[in-house]
Amino acid sequence: MKKCKLDLTLEAKPIHDECGVFGMYDFDHGDVASSIYYGLFALQHRGQESCGIAVSDTRGPKGNMLSYKGMGLVNEVFDNDRLSDLHGDIGVGHARYSTAGESIYANSQPLVLNYVKGTLALAHNGNLVNANELRARLSETGAIFQTTIDTETIAYLIARYRIHSASVEEAVSRTIDDIKGAYSIVIASPRKLIAARDPFGFKPLCIGRRDNTYVVSSESCALDTIGAEFIRDVLPGEIVTISPDAGIQSDTSHCLPEDKMGRCIFEYIYFSRPDSMIDGKSVYEARIRAGRYLAQDSPVEADLVVGVPESGNAAAMGYAMESGIPYGTAFYKNSYVGRTFIKPKQNARESSVRVKLNPIRSVVEGKRIIMIDDSIVRGTTSGQIVSMLKEAGAREVHVRISSPAFRYPCYFGIDVPARDQLIAYRRTEEDIRQLLGADSLGYLSLDRLSQMVDDLAICKGCFTGDYPVDPPEEDIRGKFDA
């Protein structure tokens, strides 16, 4: 077979989720900003480009919403002085990674909207597939957009429907009738905290409680961080309204049968923290299972099983448990290095990979290594890591991937690129093995995905091209960027 040449002009950009959302309502009227800060800190892995917090005092005027947001990490944007200025007993927070809309200050969240019924603060995780259509419709009736994110479309719809609705939750319900795609939304209204999840359940969302304070979060790990007790997940399609008068109210009129849902499997494979539970399933245990399945389906003789930090580690442990081959730590990860895709030139990105991950020579030298990673997107980073292991003295490097091969883009809040930029597009597994310089290559099979999560209904669109909801006819990410 003719050996393929890896195009190193492709950007070595890992897949990413869009955002993390967090909301709180203290019925005893204590300030919530500091706790939202720590909740966002726990969700930092979901977005590192910008963050923000908006709070309101439910005992004050309905339009009194205080907010602060900025570009960068949570601990870079906020300090004690910033947080001490944010007085309020209800609020929402957001950590952003952009897939729709530029990485600029105007697109940071939460969005705060002042309108005739008061003020709304809204934080959103996901992508709408009909954002173009909705935005055009709103523009024709006079809406003036200040951002290039579909979150603003959601906020406008809620505000407009609220004028002719009996309650804000009714306005949210009418908005959900219009929007299509992936979304987990947290809204702070003047007197209510509202959470909504799309009917397919693409994005996670859960509810917790600490004393007389209710919390809504993208992941349960953030509840643990602030000492809140997990209550339950928000159901796919459910609208939850939290208020002192009624506690937790639920509207399930938009919910679908379980077999119609499409949770994002990459929440379990890669995005979520391993200490989170999503829809009753442990992220850590799902990754352990993936590793075990790889060992069963793609065995190979070797001396050591290693994971590519961090998301490959649990699957590597599962592979080691099932195969009986020892598990080891083969890399030192420099936690102070920025993401590998933020440099402007390819040679700078490659340098960042080597600074961020360095093989431990004494661990790998002279050994046959099984290297477990969560995915291969464009392949440049994976190829560099294989090369680094061999340069450190590994005799063989066998690559095992705890997901199937990416063959299609995602339109629901995951930054999977166009097909022609995916290494698996129009290439065989042997082609990819040669491109990586690996001695063997094995992917997790499609059949194993549902088994990882005890047969929960999941979305496999980025592997099969079969999506739970019809995707747009064109890639709309960044459609409105300047």
Image: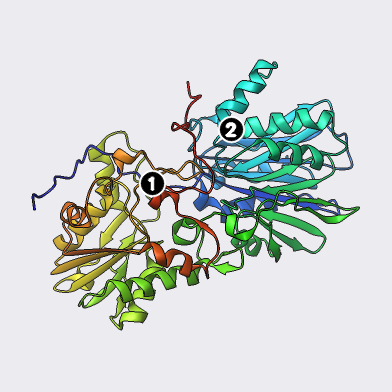
Amino acid found under the numbered disc labelled 1: Arg
Residue at 8% over, 49% down: 2
Q: Could you tell me if residue 317 is visible in this image?
A: no
Question: Residue 5 location in percent, x, y?
Answer: 14, 45
Residue at 75% over, 40% down: 172
Mark 1 crowd level (few <14, some 14–19, many ≥20, 10 Å Cα): some
Position of 237 relative to 258 (above/below): above
Quarter of the figure with residue 373: bottom left
Residue at 38% over, 67% down: 313
Quarter of the figure with residue 225: bottom right
Q: Is residue 208 left or right of residue 418?
A: right
Question: Residue 422 location in percent, x, y?
Answer: 30, 44
Position of 129 relative to 22 (above/below): above
Amino acid found under the numbered disc labelled 2: Asp
Q: Which residue is mark 2?
A: 150
Q: Which residue occupies the extreme left position in the image?
A: 2
Nearest to viewer (mark 2 / mark 1) = 2
Mark 2 crowd level (few <14, some 14–19, many ≥20, 10 Å Cα): many
Say whether marks 2 and 1 touch (CB < 8 Å).
no
Quarter of the figure with residue 403: bottom left
Question: Residue 15 location in percent, x, y?
Answer: 40, 48
Residue at 75% over, 50% down: 253
Q: Which residue is mark 1?
A: 339
Observer-nearest of 319 and 390: 319
Residues under labels 2 and 1: Cα distance? 25 Å
Give the mark, 2 or 1, whose residue is nearer the N terminus: 2
